[in-house]
Amino acid sequence: MIARILLSLRLLSDFLAAAVQITSTSDVEANFSNAEEQIELASRRGAELVGLPENFAFIGEDHQRLDIASSLSEKCSRFLVTMARRYQVILLGGGFPVPADDGRRTLNRAELVGKDGQLLGRYDKIHLFDVDLPDGNTYRESETIISGHSRPSVIDIPGFCKIGISICYDVRFPELYRHLVNEGAELLFIPAAFTAFTGKDHWQILLQSRAIENTAYVVAPAQTGLHYHRRQSHGHAMIIDPWGTVLADAGVQEGSAIAPVDNSRVEQIRSQMPCLKHRKADLF
């Protein structure tokens, strides 16, 4: 029944997008296997644009990540190419460690790969999560991760749409998304490993805000569940339309949020609610 419904939606839209939701651990090979299972399931349901969450290949202690970053970054890039070709999807790897020039930290990099395995674009996470949460968890990403320093760009995929990429904590900084929309973005990828503590109050609100204020689709793959010790992710991978309507929500189980993307919907809402044309940026 679900497959038939998705097929009918596919025929009425430009394409189906999937926001994958998994529970990654420090077992890299198990994470790859889990991710492939979800990519295959999404492709079988008709998805042509598939996003994996932040840290899809590894979530563990910082020292472990630093030790394996060099080999892991190469494995992640190869994995994305193989999966995109094998399942004929445009695939986003929503964030994996890449050794930084200082030799002590990593970049958190997302890569978008085409159906033919060609790299379409990449983005290095800009905003780093340095926060002490009331639940007792402390996060200091800047101690082991370096902020991306390249100006974010939009990836124009003929036959699909124009895509802007961000990662997790970026969602709290609306100026990034306004820049992406200024560059032509119609769909905003926001892969994440959002904490359970902050996610219950902020995740959906922030995603809907980015969709509404930019009149753009939001595709937000997510980590879910307990990873190690007390580190727990919120889940609720989502796809949201330019009006702010939640089209699909994966809940807290592993799986995918799958929904149609219709470029005419972007045009329609931007015509009906032309906020982007009404900006007075010169006053600020």
Image (cartoon, rainbow, N blue to C red):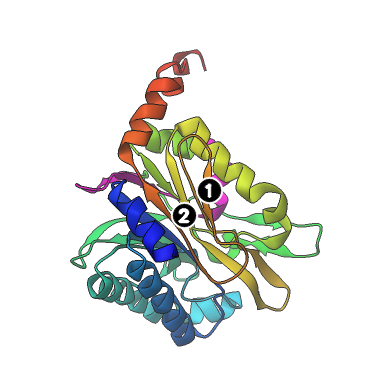
Q: Which residues are magenta?
A: 153-174
The mark that comes first in sequence, 2 or 1, is 2
Rendering coords of residue 284 (x, y %): 52, 18
Rendering coords of residue 211 (x, y %): 49, 38
Q: Secondary structure at mark 1?
A: helix
Rendering coords of residue 180 (x, y %): 39, 38
Q: Which residue is mark 1?
A: 170
Q: Is residue 12 magenta?
A: no
Q: CA distance from mark 2 to mark 1?
A: 7 Å
Question: Dividing the image into 4 quarters, which one contains the N terminus?
Answer: bottom left
- Describe residue 10's horizontal placement relative to residue 244 as left or right: left
Question: Label 2 sits on what residue type?
Answer: Lys
Occupied quadrant, residue 134:
bottom right
Residue at image point 46% right, 33% down: 214
Q: Is residue 258 above or below residue 277?
A: below
- Describe residue 149's horizontal placement relative to residue 129 as left or right: left
Residue at image point 63% right, 43% down: 205
**Residue 111 appearing in the image:** yes
Q: Is residue 262 above or below residue 29?
A: above
**Residue 94 appearing in the image:** no
Q: Is residue 167 magenta?
A: yes
Residue at image point 34% right, 54% down: 8
Q: Secondary structure at mark 2?
A: loop
Q: Residue 125: which numbered mark, if any? A: 2
Occupied quadrant, residue 253:
bottom right
Cβ–Cβ below 8 Å for labels 2 and 1? Answer: yes
Question: Label 1 sits on what residue type?
Answer: Asp
